[in-house]
Amino acid sequence: MNESAYALETRNISAWYGKDQVLFNVSAQIPEKKVTAVMGPSGCGKTTFVRTLNGLHQTNPQARATGTILLHGVDTSTLDIVDVRKRMGMVFQRPNPFPTMTVYENVLAGYYLTGCHLSRQKGDEIVETTLKKVGLWDEAQNKLFKAGTSLSGGQQQRLCIARAIAMEPEVILFDEPTSALDPKATAVIEELLSNLKTEYTILFVTHGLQQAARISDFVGFFMLGELVELGETKRIFVTPQDKRTEDYLSGKYG
Amino acid sequence: MERLSADSRREKVREAAYKTATTVAAVALVATIALFLVQLATASHASWRAFGLRFLWTTEWNPVTEQFGALPMIVGTLVTGFGALAISTPFALGIAIFLADYASKRVTEPFKYLISLLGGLPSVIFGLWGLIVLVPRIGRLEVWFGTLVHSEALVQAGTTGVGLLSSVVLLALMILPFSSSLILESLLLVPTELKEGSLALGATRWDTIQSIELPFVRKSTVGALVLALGRALGETMAVTMVIGNGMRMPRTLFDPANTLASAIANQFLEATSPLYVSALTELALILFVIAIVINIGARVILRRGVQQR
């Protein structure tokens, strides 16, 4: 057991796609039950960073990663990757509800997929409470047995959040979850975060400065595969310590 | 102003000419198929008059007494077709899943090429290979099995090796490229987002294949299998070479038999009497109808599979 006061901590994470190194010794501390935004210009490695955390990056045969990831102080390489993923939910850029499943089945997809049997009653209970948590219950309770893909884009994305929290993870990774949504649906999801962080540690990749400022308690700034700076959002935005952060905040790079 | 209107008039004439030409081509295709059906029906008229619907379920096929019944061939066609499908489907799924989800691109690409190569091989080559390599081995297997169960009839049927079983195995191999490449193509269309969404929930790769990918391609897979079945039912050359031209109703899988297609190929040149020719033509008509029904069925299933997305 390594000592770590954080929900999630990385030590010297480096990652490659083929021969290209895309992350360089990223050491980050993600505090528990807070929203930590990960921002930076496109191609800076922020998405790769969250994808190494649950091992999705490494599912690509050309990709690899090194370094240590501590989940509540436990080195994840000593755990089964399946367990790591159950404890670390993920929400993707584009809503990806499973098209062959109903709304109801999508919420419970994690249980179905991992061969976990739920009683009818327990299943109903989880569906109702998680859909309520993501504010989808009122809109979707009459559509529970319709295809998950029949919902609107914003609703689909909330369904995907429901699917992640139904597994009761400790951490939820959001990979630019609002980039495919309209402003209204984006606002709904941003509001949701303040509720979710009372129960979960949230890591939220965004390439929008304003979004990072609006939603996060902490923010990490990535550039060219390096974590330049990580700290309290207010502090980073008001008194950045690194010249590169300052330049980014003043709009010098996209 | 004058010029412009002249141009547009010429444009209109050309447009009309193109439209007519393409319409004629399209109509000609439909007309050919219709004509085909009509001519097959006309040419088999004598057989129709002599045997009526009885042709479909009587089993005697005797050119000397001019008694003709198609049931042995219909049975032979369905047994070899569905038998081949049953054997090749698990392999087709296995190949497609391996190439789509487990193999690296370096393996998948040459494999795809190899599969299409196998699919494009002339069937007479399959037939020759079947006759030289497959049939003697199947024959030994049949004799061994007959001896094992103490059945003189099976041993006798198996001695030559030609027959239903050899045809089933050969056909299974021949349709494998079609079903596996069609299934592979649809598996490759499963969006990465869905696979990653599943993995991110803690599903293993096999969980993901089973619960996300296969349901996603279910309809197109059924369509692919029906298309493969269509090919198996109509395959002529290779089957003709290994099925043994048996005209009696097959009792076991080891018996020599005939399919609709192989009966025509085997006997058309020897058919001397008009009624004999007419009966063979009626076999063709039956095969034609079966093939059309299967193909339309496959297309309907495939289209529905696409629409659902």
Image (tube, grey):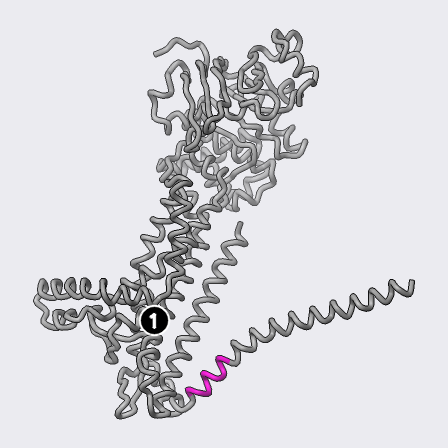
Left or right: residue B162 versus residue B281 is left
Measuring from the top left, give residue B35's x and y in whole percent: 52, 81
Q: How many numbered discs?
A: 1
The spot of residue A221 in percent (x, y) is: 58, 16
Residue B41 shown in magenta: yes
Q: Is residue B165 visible?
A: no
- Disc 1 marks which amino acid? Met
Judging by the rendered image, the residue that carries numbered circle 1 is B237
- Which sits in the foreground, A18 or A32? A18
Q: Please name the residue shown 43% across and 75% down the image.
A: B288
Q: Which residues are magenta?
A: B36-44
Q: Which quadrant, please, contains the N terminus of chain B?
A: bottom right
Q: Horizontal placement of B279 versus A219: left or right?
A: left
Residue B86, placed above or below residue B255: above
Residue A44 appears left or right of B256? right
Specify the principal SS of the magenta part.
helix
Residue at 46% over, 41% down: A105
